[in-house]
Amino acid sequence: MGRLDFCKTPLLLIWIASFLFFGCAKEEASVVGGKAADFSLKDLNGEAISLSQFQGQVVIIVFGASWCNPCNAYAPHLIDLYGKYRERGVTILEILLDQAPTSYLSKFIAEKGINFPVVLGSEEVIEVYRVYQIPVTIVVDKEGIMRERLLGFSDTLIGRLEERIKELI
């Protein structure tokens, strides 16, 4: 089983289980060109963070997990982009899809040097944003419109993401 398949399988199982147990999502699915669905998720300190609190900013939402190798390779690039564009109205919000204890995740984030907001995902957000593999990157403009959905991680993706950020700021 390849690395990419390893990252896809647990999320697919989570999605199927959430569909079977919870039915359809309460919110309509977010699609490119449409309004990004708002959500409120807890950070590692238990504080609620919502997408709407970043209104007026370009928001890069990244779905990932500590056990996902492509996600871990992506992290240094996200840290660089955040440092480069944070003062220009860009935020990065990582949604972790881990089941690990918050103490482990806090240590993981500190070791990686992640300096942007990180929240814990939910089945509803996974379903609304149609996350079937990770990493998934969602680009939301200042008006709250989803402008891009990028799958996986590569140098090409980083270039595309930075290009999109420059267009939207």
Image: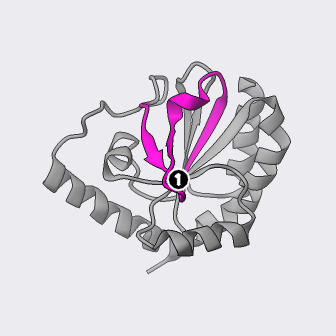
- State which quarter of the image contains the C terminus: top right
Point out the residue furthest to the top here: 143
Q: Is residue 159 left or right of residue 140?
A: right
At label 1, counting other C-alpha atoms closer than 10 Å, the crowd grade (few under 14, some 14-19, many 20 or more) is some
Q: In the image, which residues are magenta?
A: 37-62
Residue 68 at least partly seen: no
* Disc 1 target residue: 43
Q: Is residue 69 visible?
A: yes
Query: Outermost residue toward the bottom?
Result: 1
Q: Decide: is 68 above or below 114.
A: below
Relative horizontal placement of residue 136, taking residue 27 as reference (left or right): right
Tell me: residue 23, above or below residue 17: above
Q: Residue 118's spot in the image, x, y percent?
A: 58, 53
Residue beneath the point at 67% across and 27% down: 57
User: What residue lies at 15% left-to-right and 55% top-to-bottom?
Assistant: 21
- 120 displayed left or right of 86: left
In which quadrant will I find the N terminus? bottom left
Dot 1 lies on which element? loop
- Mark 1: which amino acid? Asp
Which is nearer the eye, 86 or 62?
86
Residue 88 coordinates in the image, percent (x, y): 81, 30
